[in-house]
Image (cartoon, grey):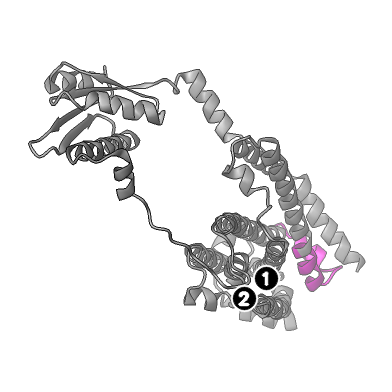
Amino acid sequence: MREFWIIFKQSFITKAKAKSFFITTLIMMAAIFLLANMPKIIDTVQHVSGGDEKETLQVIDSSGMLVDRLKEQFEAGGSGIQVEASTKSEKELTDELTAKDIDSFLSVSVDEHGIIHANYTTMSLMDFSLPSRIQEALQSIQTQMKAEELSLSGTEVQTLFTPIQFDQKNVSPSAKSEEELVTAQILVYILMFVIYMSVIMYSTMIAMDVANEKSSRVMEIMISSVSPVKHMFAKVLGIGSLGILQIVIYGITGYIAFKTSATEVPGGFAEIFSLKNVSTSTLVYAAVFFILGYFLYATLAALLGSLVSRTEDVQQMIMPMTVLIVIGFIIAATGLNNPEAAYVKYTSFFPFFAPFVMFLRVGILGLPMWEPLLAIAIMLLTIFILGWFGARVYRGGVLMYGPSRSLKDIKKAIQLGKE
């Protein structure tokens, strides 16, 4: 076991001391703090750049009865839009718009049936918010005008738009409220993304490390004093421990960032990351599926990395593994709004997809205990089989040199390992 721990420490410490590890960790920590304080930053930038100034809307009102009403609507809503009646023609305003003296203008009229007609003109290709608010305001004015025409009081108008009373009841003992479900969906997606990025990054790191040692001929010296099997599992555990440490750092950073940036405004990221609506079992399952998913793919990555002699060939060799990870994540992401779909249920028991899909189901649905436990058992069995098979391939693969870009070399590696 002494050789095992020596390689374990070497894999852990070497990667931990690398500049790339420090830089990546610091960048991610800075990004987390930036995300947590994004609302404050946006408000500050808008204040400094004058982005919070009122927007002026020039209105040509041929009816003479809509401008004042429109101004009242925007003032009541506190939208920050200042409505001004314009005596200029549409051609004159279009010329000003082309010269960029104004941003947009509105032409409104009322036909003989009392229907409002509006034309909004702008030069911006991405102007969607203001037209939508104008349309809502004019619709409200249209309702008021029709109510006055029919001699309806304000109370009678409100009665017309009174919504029905509709209650939804779920008799499942594990049912979640709408607020709890939204929070669970967001956190499950974030945790799924963390699992996805971590598994694909650290698995690739293992494959690259093995290939690098082979290309530098260091592998020949190492396997003369330690068995290839010990070397493989020590490397998997060493880099895996480093990955867990990095994720713990990100988790602590995120918790501190969102706690310190919490505002008095209810909702938002601060409330989501308070974890008050998240069960402990969801966080436990996140840790379990992350660890099992890592060992599953890390063992496969070490196996594939042992077949190549150049780091340039690693990406091509591990492409099938990468495809499996991407497919699993896509299935989970598409099933986020419908975790009860049949394809989501069946793929959640497939070991290479379970870290994403089963975690999605167990995080959102109230599953019976046997389902996640069965998925975990299948993953453990797959890891054991893959570890046994991977050790046989690794034993011969580390001794193979020359071009190797095909999975057919697995048979050659097994035969070489027997010798």
Q: What kind of residue is marked 1?
A: Leu
Q: Indicate yes or no whether the magenta region holds residue 216.
A: yes
- Label 1 crowding class (10 Å Cα cut-off): few <14, some 14-19, many 20+? many
Which of the two residues, 45 or 248, is positioned nearer the viewer here? Answer: 45
Position of residue 308 measured from the top left corner of the image (x, y, whole percent): 62, 66
Q: Is residue 9 magenta?
A: no
Name the side, left or right, on which 106 lies relative to 405: left
331 relative position to 244: left or right = left
**Number of labelled discs?**
2
Q: Which mark is residue 92?
A: none
| Image x and y of residue 343, in percent | 48, 76
Residue 352 image-quadrant placement:
bottom right
Alpha carbons under labels 1 and 2: distance apart: 8 Å
The answer to whether residue 117 is visible is yes
Residue at 71 percent across and 45 percent down: it is 255
Are the two marked residues, 1 and 2, in contact with CB atoms closer than 8 angstroms?
yes
Quadrant location of the C terminus in the rendered image: bottom right
Q: Quadrant of the N terminus?
A: bottom right
* Residues packed near mark 2 inside 10 Å, few (<14), some (14 to 19) or many (20 plus): many
Residue 296, which numbered label?
Answer: 1
The residue that appears at 37% across and 25% down in the rendered structure is 75
Main secondary structure found in the magenta portion: helix
- Sequence-wise first label, 1 or 2: 1
Q: Where is residue 21 in the image (x, y as percent from the top left)?
A: 71, 45
Question: Which residue is denoted by mark 2 in the rendering?
Answer: 351
Nearest-to-viewer mark from 1 and 2: 2
Query: Magenta residues, as a range?
Result: 215-236
Q: Residue at x 64, y 61 (%)?
A: 199
Residue 375 vertical placement versus 124 (above, below): below
**Residue at the limit of the structure toward the right, as seen here:** 2
